[in-house]
Image (cartoon, rainbow, N blue to C red):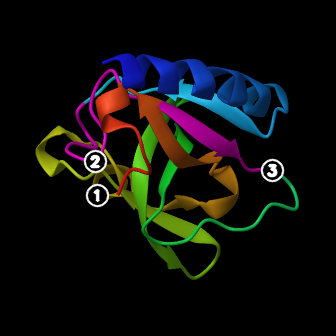
Amino acid sequence: MRRLCLGIALLAPVLLAVVRLRRFQRWAVSGASMSPALQPGDWLLVERLGPGSRQPSPGEIVLVPDPREPSRVLIKRLVRLETGGLAWLEGDNPPHSTDSRHFGPVPVASVKGVVRYRYWPPRRAGKPV
């Protein structure tokens, strides 16, 4: 337990510095649609995408505005890129996921970020698969 606390104490300033650079943002998982890769209560470090950013790749977990309610953000896995600049997104837990199977593909340009690291809870820290 002491090593875990020391690790968190050492990692916290680094995470804060990275977030302050504004290239990354913190994000909390609130639903079960990405279980088992992501669980409610997981905290993520998300790389922001914008003009000039690289395009996300199939297999990556991304953040995208909900096409039905743009003020809401969804966390989904990018399954494939389709012609015309469209992305097919799915949750890892189909019975608990509203995704491209329901609303169709979304523009790749609407992807706001790519999940890079889960930092909370400490026992689950690492790159989500």
Q: For residue 45, which quarter of the picture?
A: top right
Residue to which mark 3 is pinned: 50
Mark 2 Cα within 10 Å, few/some/many (few <14, many 20+)?
some
Left or right: 51 as drawn, with respect to 103: right
Q: Position of residue 25 (x, y in %)?
A: 67, 31
Report the residue at 40% width, 25% height from top. 3
- Dot 1 falls on a residue whose secondary structure is helix
Residue to which mark 2 is pinned: 37
- Magenta segment's dominant SS is loop
Q: Distance between the residues labelled 1 and 2?
A: 19 Å
Q: Where is residue 56 in the image (x, y as percent from the top left)?
A: 61, 65
Q: Distance between the residues labelled 1 and 3?
A: 26 Å
Left or right: 109 as drawn, with respect to 87: right
Q: Is 121 in front, or is 7? A: 7
Q: How far apart are marks 3 and 2 (CA)?
A: 25 Å
Res 67 seen here: no
* Residue 79 highlighted magenta (yes or no): no
- Dot 2 falls on a residue whose secondary structure is loop
Question: What span is colored magenta in the figure?
Answer: 32-49
